[in-house]
Image (cartoon, grey):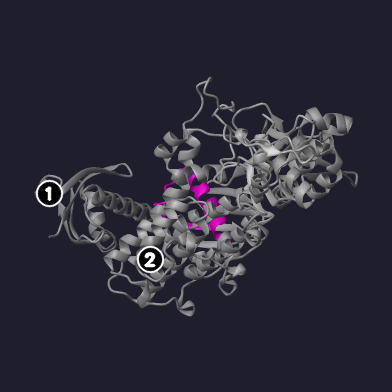
Amino acid sequence: MTAVKDRLIANNETINWIPESIGKGRFGDWLKNVQDWGISRNRYWGTPLNIWECECGHKHSIGSIAELKEMSDNCPEDIELHRPYIDAVTIRCPKCGRQMTRVKEVIDCWFDSGSMPFAQWHYPFENKEIFEDNFPADFISEAVDQTRGWFYSLLAISTLLFDKAPYKNVIVLGLVQDENGQKMSKSKGNAVDPFDALAKYGADAIRWYFYSNSAPWLPNRFHDKAVTEGQRKVLGTLWNTYAFFVLYANIDNFDPKQYRLEYDKLPVMDKWVLSRINSVTKAVDDNLWNYRITETSRILADFIDELSNWYVRRCRDRFWGEGMPQDKVNAYMTLYTVLVQLIKICAPMLPFMTEDIYLNLVRSVYPDAPASVHLCDFPAADETMIDADLEDKMEHVLKIVVLGRSARNDAAIKNRQPLSKMFVKSDLKLSGYFTDVIRDELNVGSVEFIDNTAAFTTYSFKPQLRTLGRKFGKDIGRVKEFLAGLTGADAANAMKQLKETGTMDIVLDGNATPVTEEDLLIEIARMPGYDTQEDGGITVVLDTTLTPELIEAGNVRELTSKIQSMRKEAGFEVTDHITLFIEGNDELAALTVRNASAICGDTLSDSLVTVPADAPAIAEGAFVKELDINGKSVRVGVKQIR
């Protein structure tokens, strides 16, 4: 091998190593210090070394079965090339004519592994075109310990025979460890039986864990919590989204063959999700072509979450209406289109779940479709459906909603409790549909975009004496005065500069000295009745003042939500209509009557019966529970109308 060291190094340079550091570092260093390869082994089992020797000292290497039969007088027609059978075959010495016998050694098994690319096709004796069409391989993958094993044996033999690399791309895998980062070992008792793991979690969950947990070349700590988290967040969410579609499609006998997706008739949310699935398809395709596995899994996980917890959640009431109006058709066709495209791009990573969904969503509807999702072409992104501006605006909406929820949590106000207004400061000003979504999502009366939030938050600064005392010396008193003088808009601008650049200026006698956040003691005070949250250049200010009208609206939402939960507990179908009973709290009974249209409409209550506190008489056969509605107790009954 030392004779071809330069060619080994040159051929290695043509390989796309993932990560590159293995190819140029560990593997590259191995090639720079390559030693000659002694390929014989003193074993019994293995590929017999194809060398025969004679008493005269001559040695001959047999190159084919045909040559062996030609030179041998006792080679069987159906010769078995392994020991002990091959050891009985002798050949005539071309030098002296005497009998030659095979040497007793076998070939290093790594030579077998390195010969795989051509040996699998019995090349060069047959399948010449097949071999040439498949060599070099587009991609191989093995663990990092194969740097001096299979990765090397393949390159070594290919260089000797063909003077080229036998593979174009290689992903190097890290080793699997236990949850404490220890190497798995039977002797340590920390090894996981793969068949037990498959039976417990399923193949897709385990595959997803390895794809998403970390970069493929890093060690993976395999443990229950890591696998089940991905199983719940990604696989469970995808399955639940599919199940949602199937539930309502079966109720409405929806048949996608009877309709078509008419883009011009779609509302904004449908256009957004179609744009997203095509942007995701484009990104996934690019990532997989470039072997960015972990990045692909994160893109898919994010979109599955968006599809379920944003699109479906915000559109589910569109599936509830009677009949099949255009908006309902739009919702069905959009979700169907997105699900079918999604399972196709997820199929390489989640082969079994996507196959199950495909057979039901596609094959049961279109019998002439490919028999398996894995026989479908990988989707090509429809660039005409990608609307980058729409995606940017919706991403902005999502960020604002996250901050708004954080403000509610900080103020300990449930999302079901309506609030009057919210202010937003950001570079991108939204209006119309997008502010309507924010209002609805955060349950606020109005959303106003403003340029400055200084009126809602005040900052006060003091010097950190430990650092600024040394920097300013006897002028530290003047520094205190300067910082104390920063109020209102000046303080807000100083804080903004500190966040954006990492420094703010202390100006004494016209000279500006930059200081960092570590040099300052910063106190943040919020205006009473408001909660402020800030992240990524966006600031939201939530008005947390509760008026009697807002409190009543919050009680209505709380009661409606708990009645919906009771329907599920009682085992009612989503389409079942009920009679609603309110008992034991005259105040909440009156509230229900005042808001009967909203409460009964949302809970499919065809009739409302209020029972005075002093005359409990909820109808027999109703499902009854004692509910707490924001600190007020009431008995509620729900009874299915037969």
Q: Is residue 342 magenta?
A: no
Q: Nearer the viewer, residue 97 or 448?
A: 97
Q: Is residue 555 above or below residue 337?
A: above
Can residue 522 be seen in the rendering of this structure?
Answer: no
Disc 2 residue type (three-letter): Arg
Query: What is the secondary structure assignment of the residue under circle 1?
Result: loop
Q: Quadrant of residue 85?
A: top right
- Residue at the image position 52 percent from the left and 59 percent from the top: 345
Q: Does residue 259 appear to the left or right of 88 in the view shown?
A: left
Mark 2 crowdedness (10 Å alpha carbons): few <14, some 14-19, many ≥20? some
Q: Which residue is mark 1?
A: 618
Q: Earlier in the sequence, mark 2 or mark 1?
A: 2
Disc 1 residue type (three-letter): Ile
Q: Which stretch is magenta?
A: 396-422
Q: Position of residue 126 (x, y in %)?
A: 63, 57
Q: Does residue 474 appear to the left or right of 372 in the view shown?
A: right
Q: Quadrant of the N terminus?
A: top right
Q: Which residue is mark 2?
A: 363
Q: Position of residue 167 (x, y in %)?
A: 70, 51
Q: Is residue 585 above or below residue 473?
A: below
Q: Nearer the viewer, residue 152 or 441?
A: 152
- Residue at the image position 10 percent from the left and 48 percent from the top: 617
Q: Nearer the viewer, residue 72 or 532?
A: 72
Q: Does residue 63 appear to the left or right of 572 in the view shown?
A: right
Residue 519 numbered mark, or none: none
Mark 2 and mark 1: span between their CA atoms?
A: 49 Å
Q: Quadrant of the C terminus?
A: bottom left
Query: What is the secondary structure assignment of the residue under circle 2?
Result: helix
Can residue 563 be seen in the rendering of this structure?
Answer: yes
Q: Does residue 350 appear to the left or right of 246 in the view shown?
A: right
Q: Is residue 295 above or below residue 427?
A: above
